[in-house]
Image: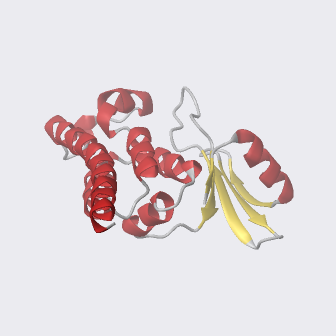
Amino acid sequence: MYIIDQQRQQALIAEMTQLRKDNQSWEVYYHNPATNVMWKSFFPKATSASRGPKILRTEPVPHELEKRLDDCLVHDNADDAIGLAIELSVEPEKWEQIIDIAAHNYRRYNRKQLSLFLKELGVERFEELFEEIGFDLSKTTLTKETFKMLARRSRRLRFKRFFYINLHGLAANFFATILQ
């Protein structure tokens, strides 16, 4: 779904046909004739000072945020977690919904993927991220306290997922020993 590595992006783009290009937003749409898949190349963290990381992802993406998280966090593909996190990091208005979904579904997600996603999303370092992307907190209904609360929930979620896996594994080993 996502490709972050520049060399892999270039190799795949060389195989595809460019459909359209927007020079103002730096978005390019491609079609891969071998697989009949549409792709989008873009810079979600682009500012007037820099473009930020380039992302190549399949197009279209699911409209439901829960489906997008499931697609990227269940399997063991770091590019999916990082790509989705970078893309959603510039939409702080969605962070509360993202944390709610992750908290509800964390048992289904790959532990490493969830941790990587939350780290790259930037919730825990929101002030630094807002400065980087030029996000003006005064232009949103969300407050600094809301973002602090989301940062705490994100940290708890990462540790909760870690302890769930470890405690579940310990319990399974304990019962396996007893049953022998």
**Residue that extends furthest to the bottom in the rendered view of this protein:** 36
Q: Tell me if residue 138 comes above or below residue 165 in the rendering.
A: above
Give percent across and percent down for residue 95: 30, 50
Lateral position of residue 43 relative to residue 142, left or right: right
Lateral position of residue 48 relative to residue 180, left or right: right
**Residue that extends furthest to the front in the rendered view of this protein:** 180
Q: Residue 153 falls in which quadrant of the image?
A: top left
Q: Residue 125 falls in which quadrant of the image?
A: top left
- Quick one: quadrant of the N terminus? bottom right
Q: Residue 105 falls in which quadrant of the image?
A: bottom left
Q: Residue at x 23, y 36 (%)?
A: 138
* Colour convention of the picture: secondary structure
- Quick one: quadrant of the C terminus? bottom left
Report the front residue among 84 and 18. Answer: 84
How many discs mark residues in the rendered view?
0
Q: Residue at x 33, y 63 (%)?
A: 176
Report the front residue among 60 and 99. Answer: 99
Give percent across and percent down for residue 85: 45, 47
Give percent across and percent down for residue 4: 63, 45
Give percent across and percent down for residue 146: 17, 42
Report the front residue among 162 and 62. Answer: 162
Residue 90 visible in this rendered orientation of the protein: no
